[in-house]
Amino acid sequence: MSPARRWAAATGTLAAAFALVSAPATGEAAASRCGDPAVRPWCRTTLTPDQRVALLLPRLTEDEKIGLLAADDPFGGPLGGFSENAHADTNNGIARLGVPPLYMADGPAGVRQGRATALPAPITLAAGFDPGAAERYGAAVGWEARHRGNDVIFGPSVDVLRAPRNGRAFEGFGEDPYLSAGLGASWIRGAQKQGVLASVKHLAVYTQETDRLALEARVDERALREVYLVPFEAAVKKGGAATVMCGFGKLNGRWACQDGTMLNTILRGEWGFTGFVASDHTAAQDAAGAAAGGLDMELPVGRRYNAWTLKNALRQNQVGRATLDGHVRNILRTMFAGGVFDRPAYANDLTLLSRAASETTARRVQEAGTTLLRNRGGALPLKAPKSIALIGRGAVENRSGYGSSKVEPFSSVAPREGIAARAGAGARITYDDGGNRGAAADAARKAEVAIVFATDSQGEFFDKSCLTLRCGEPTRGDQDALISEVARANPNTIVVLETGGPVLTPWADQVKAVVQAWYPGQQAGTALARVLYGDVDPGGRLPVTFPAAEGDTPVGTDPARFPGVNKTVTFAEGVFVGYRHYDAKNIAPRFPFGHGLSYTTFKYSDLSVRGDRVQVTVTNTGARAGIAVPQLYLGLPAPNANTPQPPRQLRGYEKVSLAPGQSTRVTFPLTARSLSYWDTGTHAWKVAKGCYRVGVGASSRDVPLTGAFAQGGGRC
């Protein structure tokens, strides 16, 4: 049986299978690390993963079993230290029995292990609204992880964005669970087709950095099921995730990495997960609790899972031997199913890594995720101006987030380089760092077009103190005031935002165009220049709502909701996260979820609504080729007064490229899950009787086509 089919047998779905290459890559020896099947019968590749584990497990000593339950080297593997070749974590395996080491790397935005392709931030990928691009993104990460000698890649992050000030907003796929679920599952499939094990994170509710190690999140059952667990469920059922990483803090009184309800009952019992669960670094709290709660492998070392604590817990019957064996079984089964035993160790050698495909992916993802928020008077695309003033340090940098997603790029193209190359020798490109507003305004005044680059600073370990650009990047002064000053000096001012999430834009009406570039990766300059000059259509749509004021967000200014009181944060908004909140409260956002302009125009027509699908025709009514992203929103009927429903929820989207005058018919299939809500009385998904409202359009606030259909004997 092939490695792909073994994985399929273990997970129950061929779609989740690894498409491992049949021949080793250059520099990899064509030999199994398991050994001779005549001596080690668990090395027979004709057996299922469970059969192989059954043969191997009894041969392990107690110390060897305990050794498999934690990583062994906090400094990255065989070379030690923080060298360029250091892995994030290493489990040394069991040499005498042919159990190979597991080498692991961080990877939500590219491999964090020395130099790698710095891909655009995952929030950029989310703005692309394209599962196919997500699969290519995951494939690029998986390919490079493999060629840095890794078996496991920590990614993707599918935590739904709840608080816009979250420092790791850029690592996820935005505020909508449906969008996050589809992109996350595709990312995983792409990575695992490269022969590495993806580790989706951070189960179950990880929404902020403030007090993250000890924070308790109080989340009601319905919000948990309909919002925060949806992407993880898809990662397991549709993506076939090999591993799951549990996060920090507590959920409703239970530590995330020893929450038996989440890790045993839901993850394994309901969703059928057969891989292993690893902890975020230092997230395990105590050996007995973690063992009973479902944690299989502790990272970065065995602080709780070590010989002393586990042997003591076994002697005192705090941990049963069957429980210990169960965790070992989960790890070994995953390694067998993923082919880790049956292939040579991946070479950790940059010379074997062809970077061209990954760099192309980085550029295309950025182009597809660059979001045109405003374009007054057709300021964009640029019409070959003879002079351009670039203002702000973002013009000469490639912004990225901090922490586990920080990638050291092989090379980079800053915006100034990309724009200068595209403008050609006949254009005069000047630069001012924006440190002195008067000087910046003077530079803008002397140019046909002024482009202001405004940035924020986000990352692991800290949340932003507010949503203004001044709070987001305090070392750069008042960037809001800088933009206003430049706009007064030059009526043709364009703003490029390089931020990890939503920010306030009080100056938006003063400028001609606003481009959201997110954290654009190493191909920033090339991709941005191609969008600004119209070589490609801006393909992005907002995966997050941009509020008009700080207090408008779902968490508002209530400290109990964010960042918490006494290390406890209350999710009082329930299912009304992101645009659902704005719609329910009738609050006008500055730029709504799903919004993004094209350089052409589109018409939506001929809506057809049935209980199993919705169809619409999209027509390019402009003079240029362009990209449309029709979006389907459903308004579900409330089954009772205690179960209010958001006015609309995303239930479908499609990305289409159309030539001038071209039309296409888009079909959005509907399933029972599309129509379901979580019933807290029966603790199950249910479809309510009643009228289901349909809206199709270009954003959550631009739905020109509406309709309805009845379910369960209800009427419209």
Image (spheres, rainbow, N blue to C red):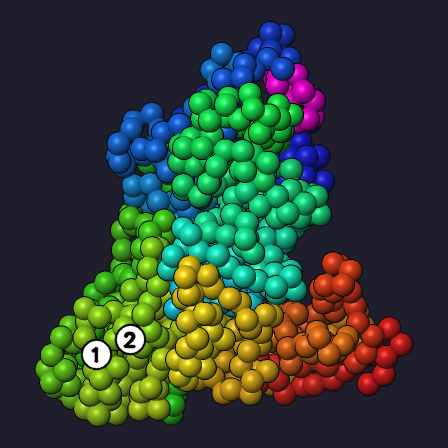
The percent position of residue 166, horizontal first and vertical second, equals 40, 64
With respect to residue 670, does 21 lie above or below? above
Q: Residue furthest top?
A: 39
Please tell me which residue lies in front, 562 or 240: 562
Q: Is residue 377 located in the magenta-colored stretch of the structure?
A: no
514 w.r.t. 21: above or below: below
Q: Say which quarter of the image contains residue 701.
A: bottom right
Q: Amino acid at mark 2?
A: Leu
Which stretch did the figure color magenta?
Answer: 43-57
Task: Judge by depth and name the residue closer to the eye, 602 or 622.
Answer: 602
Disc 1 marks a residue whose amino acid type is Asp
The residue where tag 1 is placed is: 478
Q: Position of residue 170 (x, y in %)?
A: 40, 62
Residue identified by numbered label 2: 469
Q: Earlier in the sequence, mark 1 or mark 2?
A: 2
Tell me if residue 343 comes above or below residue 419 in the rendering.
above
Residue 192 drawn at (x, y percent): 55, 42
The majority secondary structure of the magenta stretch comes to helix
- Mark 1, other Cα within 10 Å: few <14 / some 14–19 / many ≥20: some
**Residue drawn at 57 percent across, 83 percent down:** 583
Q: Position of residue 194 (x, y in %)?
A: 51, 40
| Residue 97 located left or right of residue 490 | right
Q: Is residue 357 visible?
A: no
Q: Decide: marks 1, 2 in contact (CB < 8 A)?
A: yes
Label 2 element class = helix
